[in-house]
Amino acid sequence: MIYLDNAASTKLLKSAYEDMVPFIMEQYGNPSAVYQFGVEARNAVDKARRKVANSLSVSPDTIYFTSGGSEADNWAILATLASHPNEKCHIISTKIEHHAILHTLEFAEKMGHEVTLLDVDSEGRVNPKDVEASIKDNTVLISVMFANNEIGTVEPIAEIGAIAKAHGILFHSDCVQAYGHVPIDVEECNLDLVSVSSHKIYGPKGVGALLIRKGVKIGALIHGGSQERARRGGTENVSGIVGFGRASEFASNTLMERFEKERNLRDTFWSMLKKAIPDAVLNGSTEYRVPGNINVTFPGVSADSMLIRLDMEGICASAGSACTSGAVEPSHVLKAIGLTDSDAKSTLRFSLGLYNTLEEINITVDTVSRIYKDLKK
């Protein structure tokens, strides 16, 4: 199998798996327990918290573990609104956000709040001037993703963060696709809230985190016990958190090495693909882009048909993000950057990762080219 869908999920690191196993089979104590067996689990959670914090160069007491990026996104938005009781609040975001943001904002509108979704340019970049022009007296949050999950475009986060800080507005970024793949400077970008996920960086599924900057006064999304310093009820997923900690440490230590490798593979992939299929069109920014993303429109053919054929030959790719695969409607991201419905439904995403090789790229380009020509006939 050639796996080129790393933006959807990544292979678990062997070292992360090995760290997790004892906390599944042997050290299974509840980290809230006061006896030694529970204290060992608590220490493991705290150690993982330090690793995640170190990967973002922040204090461990700003890291709160969640079930993943979607929960972290929900928490950032809904808890911010809850901190303004009996007020009609305004939130600014973009039209290309992940559905974890967009659907939560739709829910916020049903609660009576106001949302502004900004347009992006043809490369998927939002204009910071549009962000500032949209600010109102009741704006309480700006939420802009760091890197897009479909087209890989990296947003001008530092510029937007400066605007948010100047106006005294909380700034949240869904960093799920960027974390562990491109440098994220929380201080430079003036980020107050950051969502990250484990399974995009070779950790286990079902665990992530929300960074809440010191002094940001938002409460819990999930109410229950006093876990996560009384901000996130529910017994911690100890083994998952331990695996996440190991993956975050690995991602931080190898970031630039992997960045160069993935960027070189990506550029080689696109160069070869464009030569084999001159009609192919690369979507997203060529300058501001996560290293492993290749989002390509193949005019006149069905992306679903291509995916089926690729799957039959042992190659895994995606028609847009994993959360929209199989949907009847074309990708909202591709439509936002100006693609027609037809072109959006003729688009594939290939996302490279740690384990991909040049040999796999050669095989994939040859296979895609052959399938494309067959389907065009």
Image: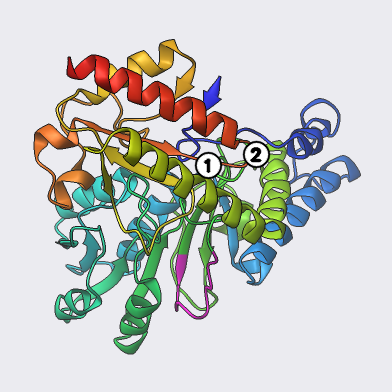
What residue does disc 2 label?
237
Residue at the image position 35 percent from the left and 52 percent from the top: 148
Residue occupying the far right of the picture: 36
Which quarter of the image is occupied by the N terminus? Answer: top right
Q: Amino acid at mark 2?
A: Asn
Upstream in the sequence, badge 2 or badge 1?
1
Say whether residue 189 is magenta. Answer: yes
Say whether residue 228 is magenta. Answer: no
The x and y percentages for residue 282 are 29, 46
Q: Within 10 Å of the Cα at label 1, are there few (<14), some (14-19), or many (20+) other Cα atoms?
A: some
The boundaries of the magenta stretch are 183-193
Q: Amino acid at mark 1?
A: Ser
Residue at the image position 27 percent from the left and 48 percent from the top: 283
What residue does disc 1 label?
67
Foreground residue among 196 and 276? 276
**In the image, residue 274 above or below residue 126:** above
